[in-house]
Amino acid sequence: MIRRHIELIKLLIQENEYKPASFFSEILHVSTKTLYSDMDELIQVAKKFGLDLVKIPRSGILLKGTEQQKDQLMDYIQNDIQGDEYSKEYRRLQIVKRLLILEDKISIEKLSHEFLVSKTSLYNDLVIIEKTMDDPSVKLLSSHDGIEIVGKESNIQRVIERLIISFHIETQIGMEDVIQIFFNKEIVNVVDRLLFEDYLDLTEYVSDYYLRGLRLDMMIFLSRIKLNHHLEKEETFLFNSLKYMETFIVANSMVEKIKYALHIQLTNEDVEYFSQQLFAHRITSKIKTSDPEYESTVKQLLERMTEMEKIDFINDEKLYKSLLYHIPAMIIRLKKGVQIKNPLLADIKSQYTKLFTVVWYALSFIESEYELSLNDDEVSLILIYFQLSLEKLSKTKNIIIVCPYGTSSSQLILNKVKQFLPSRDHIEVATVAKIEQSDLSNVDMIITPVDISTKNVLCVKVNPLISDEDLTRIMQAYTTQLLCYDSHKTREEINMPVTTRYVDIKFVKLHKTYSSKDECLNSMISELEKYGYVTDQFRKSIFNREKMGSTSLDTGVALPHADPDTVKKPVISITTLNKPIKWGDVSVSLIIMVSLSEEEIDTFSSVISELYQLIGNKEHVHRIVELDSIENMIQIFR
């Protein structure tokens, strides 16, 4: 007996009046012709229990017999048919479906009446379901209002997956049949179209194991979104989030199709979670490269980054293929004016300030070649590929600075530590609560002004107002325990051998007064134009870069820069202000305009690294702004 027959018998038992065939066919989502065919088979089943299945034209259909005879037929359906969908396993799956996918307001009484089983059996069902869930953080709660599930949304979705797989294994019902039972057909169709049609170029290389898992997870994810259950913001470190961003563009593209097909909205947290699911199921393990006409563009970018960073990116095959897949789509987006938001943008610009500037500079040729304007979100997404490559090539360390007293003390520690540890290391600020809640397995060292309890992680205790002795202790721990060699090297004086080549006294202005960022920029640009250092496109390039996103830093410095093609002679212009002006969200008193041409591109990264020794520290910035002579300013850069 198939499931549809069982559902039809159940409907017939519940009705005491004649109902038209259309009444039953609409509920069962079948034609009236199919319904009459089913009834021909069920007439003999009904007769076994003394029941008469009657069809009267223009009146309808009715199952005639006593209540006792109907109960016996239901008992037969419930207990005597081996492997049918009304087994206790199927009943439990229906409870899970209604709670988590349909979100019906169900009660023990309602379930008892519907499934014709005792309340004791149903309470036992809930115990079995909760045991199968195998997650103490997710609970089934029963009250007078009904049964509800309580827990974090990400955990609830994992529990649903576990319950579905358990039902599939215990009943030996095929997974496709289970999916048809459990999920809305529209959602199943959308997921299948995405994975097996729209994005076949990405999924065709993925093993069946991972693809089946992703398919099920996507159905659960979208079913819950339909019910307005969204993912929570996860407490994690930036270096743990970066790897998932490899799939962020694909996730965003899929989300746009999902929103249109299912008429639903997804939050930033939903998209991040979806991106993690794509990554976890190996969607990026073998990226199929895109249009070969962009190969020269990608190779040129890799050559520029290699020249600037003095690291061999050219022979990183995965980086090459990732960029070859990403960049054509990026160019199309920018040409069409399609905006994409990177949820990690603020963290990336804060954590990888120097690399962000270098990547933008390396990408600048794309703006002129394809006649488009980059933006911070797109640059940050390209940065991720290079940062992941750097981690692979240079054994990047993950370092956490604990913030117990507020941001000012931790920022002081952060600024000082960043001056002498390698710029490629992840150095991130976190609260004590975040340390306690996060996975520390990828953390190499914690620098903390308070006592914290951690296992298997190197901890260095420092004073809230960090001293030179603290810095020496950090460096000794770093070199002896992370790099495994002895070093007694202390913090060196700031040295700027490359930057000094480009600082020209003509372009150093002290204690100027401007009413706005635009006025300041126009004044500095006019000076460069006056002496023939830049082309007539330089001004436009500077302002286009500012439109992409602010070039200011939290330390009160602005670092405007232009496309190197617009520079005739390399120079660094420096301006200090009597009164700070707003530069984006930051009040700025020091402006350093870096104007380097294509011929100097190999020195750009070194210049930025040297400058950040100064501008990454508020104390240094304050001292520079206070300088009262150009000679003293020039001396800073010697």
Image: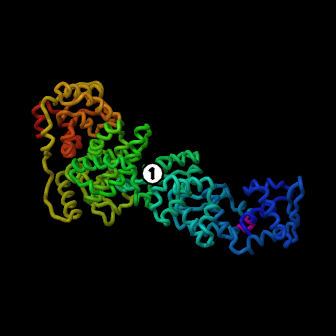
543 over 380 or under it: above or below: above
Residue at point 22%, 64% (across, down): 481
The quadrant holding residue 565 is: top left
Q: Position of residue 74 (x, y in %)?
A: 78, 68
Q: Position of residue 276 (x, y in %)?
A: 44, 56
- Secondary structure state at the residue bearing disc 1: helix
Whether residue 116 appears in magenta in the rendering, the answer is yes
Count of picture labels: 1
Whether residue 323 appears in magenta in the rendering, the answer is no
Q: Which residues make up the magenta segment?
A: 115-119
383 over 572 or under it: above or below: below
Answer left or right for 281 relative to 412.
right
Report if residue 186 is visible in the image: yes
* Residue occupied by mark 1: 250
Q: Position of residue 159 (x, y in %)?
A: 54, 63
Residue at point 40%, 57% (across, down): 287
